[in-house]
Amino acid sequence: MEQKKILVVDDEIEILRFIEKAFQKNNYFVKVTNEPLEAENILKKNNFDIVLLDLKMPGMDGMELLEIIKKNYSKVEVIIMTANATLETALECLRKGAIEYLIKPFEIAELFATIEKAIRVIELKAQLVSMKELEKLKDEFMSTVSHELRTPLTAISGAIEILYEREKVEDEKRGGFRRQIDKDMHKLLSIIGRQTKKMKELVNNLLDFTKMEAGFIELKKENIPIKKLVQEVIDEIKPLAETKKIEITQKICSENINCDYEYIKRVITNLLSNSIKYTQENGKVSIVFDKVGDEIRCVVEDTGVGIAKENLDKIFEKFYRVDQSLTRESGGFGLGLSICHKIIELHNGKIWVESEGLAKGSKFIFTLPI
Ligand code: ADP
């Protein structure tokens, strides 16, 4: 561990000598001064970790020096020493940023226990700073990567579209007749098309998520008829439901809602496609919108795999995915629901999930103020 640097400020010379010796013996870098006005000059010259500060000194009040230190040397931890600590002064010192106080006279063991506590705090704070820096780097990295991935993906999608068109023209030329090689090509092209679409969705989710995390989202609110919005989502999502023979029922109130059309559409799409993803063939999915008090409430319910009680709170967390064996097939990043959460939060609404447990279906509910 790196040698910690301590400054002791006290007008009583004997106490200074006593503390100085104790620290030197224990291999600390220590400087002492009985001049509070001198303390700032000493602080400027060295990178101290801790200041041990007497409260009552002639020339400058310890409290005043504490404020100066916390303002100008925010990384330095201050321990107050006082002979007549009332609870009030002690609390005042802690409120002004001191980490602890020692009541004079104190034992050497007490002094070192307090110093060790301060050192632990300093180390934890340093760890926190490096974690925050790492988190920022990670966000920047994710944002750059998803951005860079979008360009080649768009080019691939464009090329696939052209190939599909050519295939159609060729097909027409041959009067609908397809050779085996054409059938194989068509199958391969479909796989590339499907997987590219999925990759685009993943990358878009990642990009949107990083934007939202960084607070780069501006809502474009407008007055929207809920029925129209839901119908659009259902029309888009129907083919997915049909492949699993899942019936989608709807009951939608005739209110309008003031929201960002694209983002709320995204939430509904996400909830409905999750319901389809996590429901077995021939299952049922329903969506209900109604007005409850001064809120609009949406409930998306399915008869699918359900969610275990212990996972209910976690599924809105970023990158959280329940049991991989259940979800491997559907292959997301675990970002869809955290994006929904953020969107609803930005609209001052609430979103949550209810489920009686595994195999008992799920119910996702969100509310928006009217
Ligand atoms: P993913 O991309 O994994 O679908 P989401 O954030 O949309 O990410 O969902 C997180 C997890 O929540 C999913 O991996 C899944 O386990 C669970 N989940 C979401 N919707 C449902 C649902 N309707 N029924 C059961 N589990 C669900």
Image (cartoon, rainbow, N blue to C red):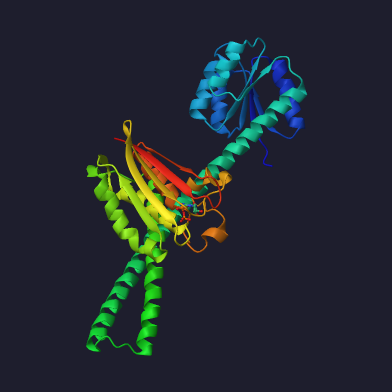
Out of 28 and 171, give the one closest to the viewer. Answer: 171
Q: Position of residue 300 (x, y in %)?
A: 40, 47
**x%, y% of residue 217?**
33, 45
Is 284 left or right of 15, judged from the image as shown?
left
At x 62%, y 33%, the residue is 121
| Residue 53 position by quadrant | top right
Residue at the spot 45% in from the left edge and 56% down from the top edge: 141
Residue 255 in percent (x, y) is at 25, 40
Check the picture and name the quadrant holding the N terminus.
top right
Query: Which is nearer the eye, 298 or 248?
Result: 248
* Res 57 visible: no
Q: Position of residue 173 (x, y in %)?
A: 22, 88
Image position of 299 with respect to 6: above or below? below
Q: How many marks?
A: 0
- Whether residue 161 is visible here, answered yes or no, is yes
- Say which quarter of the image contains residue 347: top left
Q: Nearer the viewer, residue 253 or 6?
A: 253
Locate residue 105 relative to residue 370 in the image: left or right: right
Residue 68 against residue 152 in the figure, above or below: above
Q: Is residue 104 above or below residue 164?
A: above
Q: Quadrant of the C terminus?
A: top left
Q: Is 115 or 188 nearer to us in this picture? A: 188
Residue at position x 74%, y 21% from top? 18
Task: Identify the residue shown where x is 33% and y is 43%.
Answer: 289
